[in-house]
Each structure stands twice: as C-alpha cells, then as structure tokens.
Amino acid sequence: GKSSLGRAILALEPVAGGEVRFRGAPVGKATLAPFRRETAMVFQDAVSSLSPRRSISQLIAEPFRIHGLTDRDLNAEVLRLLSLVGLPAAMADRYPHQISGGQARRVGMARAVALDPSMIVADEPTAGLDVSVQAEVLNLMRRLQDRTGMAIVLITHNISLIRHVADRVAVAYMGRIVEEGPTETLLASPAHPYTAALIAAQP
C-alpha cells in the first residue's frame, strides 16, 4: 500500500477514507490546481513513466505546458533542468528507449522539479539500479533538496537508504502505519516486530 498512499497524497488515486492536508488545508477539487502546481511525483518505473513517443526535451517541458507557462523560453528551461540533474544538453534530443535506467530517473527528477515544487513524492527512486547508480540518484535528491528546500516523501523498503537520507520515517505494515518518528530514534529502538524484521533483513 505504500505506492497507493503516495499516489493518494497527490490525488492521483481516490481517497477511500480520511483526507489529505497540505499546508494545513484539505486537498479537494477547489484546491487541486494550485496543489498540483506545488507538488510532483517521481514514479517507481522511471522508463515506463516516460512517453516513448516524446523526446526528453518534450517530456521535461511538459509541466510548463500543462500549467500554461509557455511564455518562457522552454528550450532554455530544458537545458537548465538537464544541467541541474547532471545530464548533458545532447540528451534533450533523445527518446526514452535511448537512455539508461539511471538516466531515466534523472529525467523523471528533472520533470518533477521543473516548477520548483514544495514537495515531491519519490516512489522507490533507486529500485532496479546498481549500487553506484543508486548513490548517484540519492546524492542528486539531496542536492536538489538543499538547493530548493523542497520536502521529499520517500517511499521505499530499503532501510539502509532511509537511514542515510530520511529525517523522519513511518513504517507501513498490512496497509497501516504501525510506528512513526525521527529516523535515528526509530531505527535504534523499533517498537513494532515488522520494523525490527526490516532492520534485521539488511546486510
């Protein structure tokens, strides 16, 4: 249910019960447009989240078009965002099938931060990547967070990743949050057996 929760937070899936609040106000139809402008998602399957019929340039420029921000130089914005995520300008003319999984993650990140969001939801951003590329993606996320001040809701089952990047952690078990708190405190003395099992499963 972790991915479903992340998508529900961003109103990409309906909420069956309860409510999502952003800046203290409930997210609903009346507030959805400005909420969408301030938030973004990095999807778990980076490659399939990119339309194969569009170039990397078109994909990164898409948020500007969706929100009607076409009065700016979109080519310049694309080059700025590619540079921000550590990709060369030549990448703009490629298509998703011509890039690696790690590069697709960076393109997804560039698209997510295009409008300077206050919050992004990153769903298993390192899944399927080798260890060195995982480190590159995580370092990129930290640099973007330091530069922009945005909040990152990171969805993962990787306790080692959480230990290194998260300030607070919530543990979900059978679709429910079973414990939550500062990362160091929670991982040092887990209160729930599932949390202890996750920690013990890490090499």
Image (spheres, helix red, strand yellow):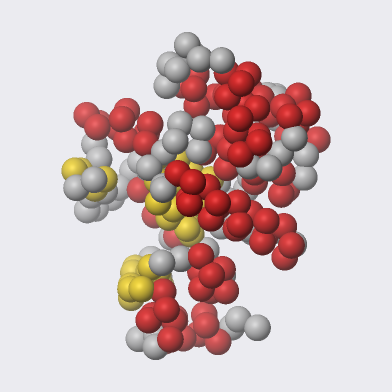
Which residue occupies the extreme right position in the image?
98
Could you tell me which quadrant the N terminus lies in?
Answer: bottom left
Measuring from the top left, give residue 168's x and y in whole percent: 38, 68
Q: Which residue is drawn at 57% across and 74% down?
A: 160
Compared with residue 3, is residue 192 higher up or lower down, i.e. above or below?
Answer: below
Measuring from the top left, give residue 68's x and y in whole percent: 43, 16
Tell me which corner region of the image, top left, top right, bottom left or bottom right, holds residue 12: top left
Locate residue 68 relative to residue 200 in the image: left or right: left
- Observer able to see residue 7: no
Measuring from the top left, give residue 94's x and y in whole percent: 77, 28
Q: Which residue is drawn at 51% across and 32% down?
A: 114
Tell me which corner region of the image, top left, top right, bottom left or bottom right, holds residue 67: top left
Which residue is nearer to you in this view: 31 or 38? 38
Measuring from the top left, give residue 88's x and y in whole percent: 75, 35
Which residue occupies the extreme top position in the image?
71
Locate residue 179 relative to residue 130 in the image: left or right: left
Compared with residue 169, is residue 143 higher up or lower down, i.e. above or below?
Answer: above
Could you tell me which quadrant the C terminus lies in?
Answer: bottom right
Locate residue 161 relative to residue 79 in the image: left or right: left
Figure disc tally: 0
- Observer able to see residue 99: yes
